[in-house]
Image (spheres, rainbow, N blue to C red):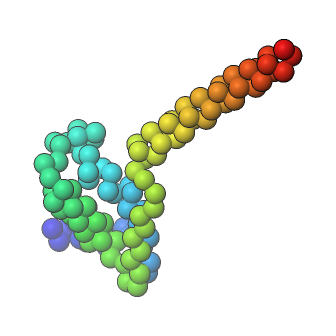
Amino acid sequence: MEVLEQKVKSNNPQVDNLYLDMNGIIHPCARPQQNGGAPVGSEQEIFDNIYAYTDKILKIVKPQKVLYLAIDGVAPKAKLNQQRSRRFRTAKEAEEQRDREAEIKANWKD
C-alpha cells in the first residue's frame, strides 16, 4: 500500500478544493450491472457503494480545504426518458391543434 500512496503523492499535486458531481458516482453505484458488475441487492448496498467510491476518491485526492458534493437533477437515463415523453406529448398536442384548426375551418365554411 505504501508504494501506491507514494506514486499517488508524487503524481498528484496538493489539492485545496475538490468539487464532485455526485450524479456521475451515484448512477454507476446504483446500477453496476450496466458496467459488467453484479446487480445491487438493496438500497443499503447502493449507499455502501457510493460511500466506498467517494472514500476511494478522497484517499487519492486528499483535498485540504473544501469538499463540495453536488447532486443536481435526475439521473441521465431518467432525464432521457423525460425528454422523450415531453417530445411525444408536444408532437401529440401539435397534431391535436392541427385537427382542431382543420375542424374549425371546415365548420366555418358551412
Q: Nearer the viewer, residue 55 or 79?
A: 79
Q: Given the current orientation, which residue lies at the most extreme left position?
A: 41
Q: Residue at x 13, y 48 (%)?
A: 41
Which x, y percent locates residue 85?
50, 36
Snapshot quadrant of residue 1: bottom left
Snapshot quadrant of residue 59: bottom left
Number of callouts: 0
In-image side of 46 versus 92 (left or right) = left
Which x, y percent locates residue 66?
41, 81
Which x, y percent locates residue 51?
23, 66
Q: Given the current orientation, which residue lies at the most extreme front position?
A: 110
In-image side of 83 versus 51 (left or right) = right
Q: Quadrant of the C terminus?
A: top right
Q: Given the current orientation, which residue lies at the most extreme right position?
A: 109
The answer to whether any part of residue 14 appears in the image is no
- In the displayed structure, 62 sits above or below 72; it is below
Q: Residue at x 65, y 25 (%)?
A: 95
Q: Residue at x 25, y 69 (%)?
A: 55
Q: Nearer the viewer, residue 65 or 11?
A: 65
- In the displayed structure, 86 sits above or below 29; it is above
Which x, y percent locates residue 58?
30, 71
Q: Nearer the viewer, residue 93 or 37?
A: 93
Q: Residue at x 84, y 21 (%)?
A: 108
Q: Given the current orientation, which residue lies at the most extreme bottom position?
A: 65
- In the displayed structure, 76 sits above or below 61; it is above
Q: Nearer the viewer, residue 60 or 39?
A: 39
The answer to whether any part of residue 72 appears in the image is yes
In-image side of 93 versus 80 (left or right) = right
